[in-house]
Image (cartoon, rainbow, N blue to C red):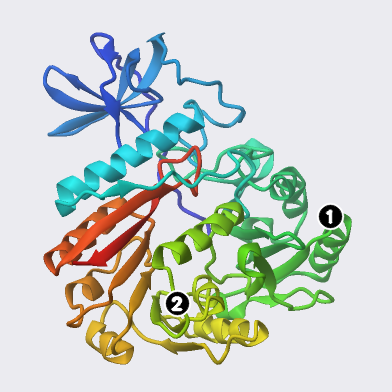
Amino acid sequence: MKRRHRRAPKPATEPLPQPVLIERMADGGQGVTHLDGKLCFVAGALTGERVEAAWLNRHASYDEAITTAVLHASTERVTPPCAAYERCGGCVLQHQAPDAQARDKQAQLAEKLERLGNVAPDAWLAPVRGPAWHYRRRARLGVRHVPKKGGVLVGFRERRSSFLTDMTACPVLDARLSDLIAPLRTLIGGLSIAAQVPQLEVTATDDDVLLVMRHLAPLSDADRAALTAFAAEHGLRWFLQPAGPASVHPLPPADDRPLQYRLDAFGLSLEFGPLDFTQVNFAINQQLVPLAVDLLAPTPGERIADLFCGVGNFSLALASRGASVLGLEGDAALVARARDNARRAGLAERCTFDTVNLYDDADAALGRLGRQDAWLLDPPRSGAQALCSALPAPGPARIVYVSCNPATLARDAGLLAAQGYRLARAGIIDMFPHTAHVESIALFERS
């Protein structure tokens, strides 16, 4: 079946009637200005800059534009190192110095907490920072067969489009993954099913490089031989996904052993499967987990709930400090993996894991929890509204909330404040440099 693609947006052609001064940075990484009193978001601009721009879209209450010339540049402006930066939607802030990115992200978190949650931390934590480049160990790369562009494209989508960026490397991906983009274009272009490969899930650990290829048609014997030869040449492992996630399997003669990442501060090694959720920035995770544990300050024998526990990323670290940990997670496969990780680490006696729907059945989840001395929350972008709305009385003395969405963290912070918690500390986790994504951590203490 022929694929249908959304038409690419028309290029900006109508210039703004006058240069504009950028007042601040918006959540999405654009500059903010006002034109005749109307809000306008300007891509590619930084606070304090005077720029010429052209309209992309006009709406009733705001407009969108793109920078066409920088008349007065910010001292924070830098030259993006990526050749595909102007087109690729993977990053939107490579033109801003990393230190300034972190500062602006903290300002956005503070604004959300105050405006949406009516709270402010007693103290700000220092931003958790890591390498600015080649930090991303996991990614989903799109694949498209585009004969007009010379064959197969592999990479991220273009900005404001579903089309793929024509790229041969990526400076935010782990170098081993970045170096595979060009060879993968050639490899997949030579397969009999080149037009039936929509995506690749790529992972690089300290010891392994693994690729999961989604394919919509059966592989030929020649295809399998080509993949096997490619794996041998580049020192990687192939997994194939002919249907849903349950269909993922290794390409023989590869083995199906799990991947691993380490938490050096605790002497732990955690296993995860090809499609299991883990943090994509392993260097930041090495700092995030000790920080969360230090904020919770577990003591031997304390009962701690790890909600949205995944493969046990925080659970095992907390248990290694002597706490008795109950991990709850909605994905049964992740729960099984967490149990295996606890057993391998010799922490099974201190860790219990159960499968519980933490969104639609908060009452059951809270009933399963019982009384806990502390909670650790690490929800997806939608947050933990149901849990934060229905805390038992008395609730846990301390709650550490790890968030990937400042808006839902702020909402939930307001719910916790209404139940007698104060926001003791908060800070950003710079998990995704050069993007507008803001990860954060907060400590709540019962008053």
Residue 94 lies, in percent from the top left, at 51, 31
Residue at 20% in and 78% down: 391
Above or below, comparing residue 332 to residue 446 in the picture: below
Q: Considering only vertical position in the picture, is 220 above or below 322?
A: above
Of tags 2 and 1, the one toward the viewer is 2
Image vertical order of residue 281 relative to residue 50, above or below: below
Q: Tell me: 296 left or right of 95.
A: left
- Residue 205 numbered tag: none
Distance CA(mark 2)–CA(mark 1): 46 Å
Q: Residue 131 appears at what percent x and percent y?
A: 60, 42
Q: Position of residue 401 (x, y in %)?
A: 35, 63
Residue 219 drawn at (x, y percent): 73, 69
- Secondary structure beneath label 2: loop
Q: Where, quadrant-wise, is the C terminus in this rendering?
A: bottom left
Given residues 321 and 175, the one toward you in this image is 321
* Residue 184 vs residue 207, the one in the foreground: 207
Which residue has dot 2 on it? Answer: 299
Residue at the image position 44 percent from the left and 74 percent from the top: 298
* Residue 198 visible within the image: no
Nearer to the camera, 162 or 255: 255
Which amino acid, mark 1?
Answer: His
Q: Secondary structure at mark 1?
A: helix
Residue positioned 52% across, 44% down in the render: 129
Q: Label 1: which residue? A: 234
Question: Is residue 38 found left or right of 334 in the rendered image?
Answer: left
Say which amino acid is labelled 2: Thr
Decide which of 150, 443 is in the foreground and name it: 443
Regarding residue 334, the answer to whether it shows in the image is: yes
Upstream in the sequence, badge 2 or badge 1?
A: 1
